[in-house]
């Protein structure tokens, strides 16, 4: 798996020589495996842990676990405590969205404070599949269905190629310790229902269903990139500039009227 990990990094140029990373380290299996792989690949990084105080003593246990792991490995560790539920109520958003907003805002603040290059998160192929179905159910177009990118600005996802099964197998074989989040098996949130109820149906339909889904998502991402490039090229041909004003002439719409869906 280490070889595949390094090949993926090289393929998308996720980590350049001399890059310093902030690793989002929750203590769960995904981020602990990513930490192990980064250590073996001799990538310089510090750990950043978010305590969202959503699971009582379990959240504090994760906090202690990550601090202890970092101390034992000689890794600098930063921990941030959040009042996640208050934030969600204040802005009228879900707990999941609140945690996401708080997490990424702090990661970026910490990155700038340290002068580091990138933020590594442990999203993997199953996360990609779950996100696809979440966006599909929300009526997303091509841009939403393409899924997460290996790199988005300073955010990198070096495990996006790996399935949850591959990650678990690596953890067991390499004696990686982690903390289990009991809420992962609860079908309360939409993502969990997709993970626990929908994706297993795909496994029953066809043995390689998830692999095929991962490939389809790669195709969607590539097609979206091509579409965006062609769109920019076309806009460059028809947009007219008058100082700070940009406009598309009416004639351009007449030339590029869409074909009717039904004849």
Image (cartoon, helix red, strand yellow):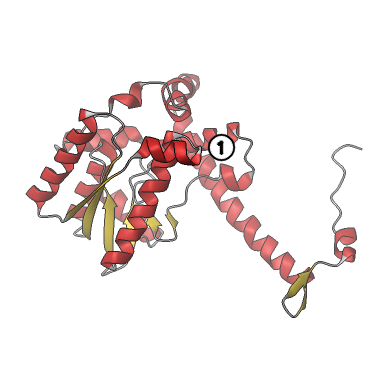
Residue at figure coordinates x 67%, y 65% from the top left: 232
64 sits left or right of 22 in the view: left
Residue 30 position (above or below residue 233): above
Coordinates of residue 44 in the picture (x, y in percent): 21, 61
Asked which quadrant contains residue 144, the reply is: top right
Coordinates of residue 86 in the picture (x, y in percent): 39, 37
- What secondary structure is found at the residue carrying circle 1? helix
Residue 188 position (above or below residue 14): above
Is residue 178 at all visible to an observer of this figure? no
Q: Name the residue under label 1.
A: 135
Residue 46 position (above or below residue 212): below
Residue at figure coordinates x 33%, y 25% from the top left: 183
Asked which quadrant contains residue 164, the reply is: top left
Is residue 26 at all visible to an observer of this figure? yes
Coordinates of residue 32 in the picture (x, y in percent): 22, 42
Q: Nearer the viewer, residue 243 or 30?
A: 243
Residue at figure coordinates x 30%, y 51% from the top left: 5
């Amino acid at each position: 798996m280490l070889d595949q990990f390094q090949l993926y990094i090289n393929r998308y140029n996720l980590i350049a020589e001399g890059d310093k990373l902030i690793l989002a380290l929750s203590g769960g299996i995904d981020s602990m495996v990513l930490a192990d792989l980064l250590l073996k690949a001799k990538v310089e990084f510090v750990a950043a842990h978010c305590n969202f105080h959503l699971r009582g003593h379990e959240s504090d246990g994760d906090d202690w676990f990550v601090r202890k792991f970092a101390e034992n490995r000689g890794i600098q560790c930063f921990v941030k405590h959040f009042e996640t539920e208050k934030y969600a109520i204040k802005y009228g958003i879900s707990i999941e969205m609140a945690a996401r907003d708080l997490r990424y805002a702090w990661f970026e603040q910490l990155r700038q404070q340290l002068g580091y290059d990138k933020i590594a998160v442990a999203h993997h192929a199953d996360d990609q599949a779950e996100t696809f179905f979440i966006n599909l159910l929300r009526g997303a177009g091509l841009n939403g269905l393409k899924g997460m990118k290996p790199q988005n600005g300073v955010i990198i996802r070096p495990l996006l190629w790996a399935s949850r099964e591959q990650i678990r197998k690596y953890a067991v074989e390499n004696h990686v310790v982690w903390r289990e989040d009991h809420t992962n098996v609860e079908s309360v949130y939409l993502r969990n229902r997709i993970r626990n109820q929908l994706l297993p149906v795909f496994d029953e339909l066809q043995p390689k269903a998830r692999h095929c889904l991962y490939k389809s998502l790669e195709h969607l991402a590539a097609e979206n990139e091509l579409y965006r490039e062609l769109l920019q090229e076309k806009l460059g041909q028809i947009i007219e500039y008058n100082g700070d004003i940009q406009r598309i002439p009416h004639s351009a719409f007449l030339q590029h009227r869409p074909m009717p869906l039904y004849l």
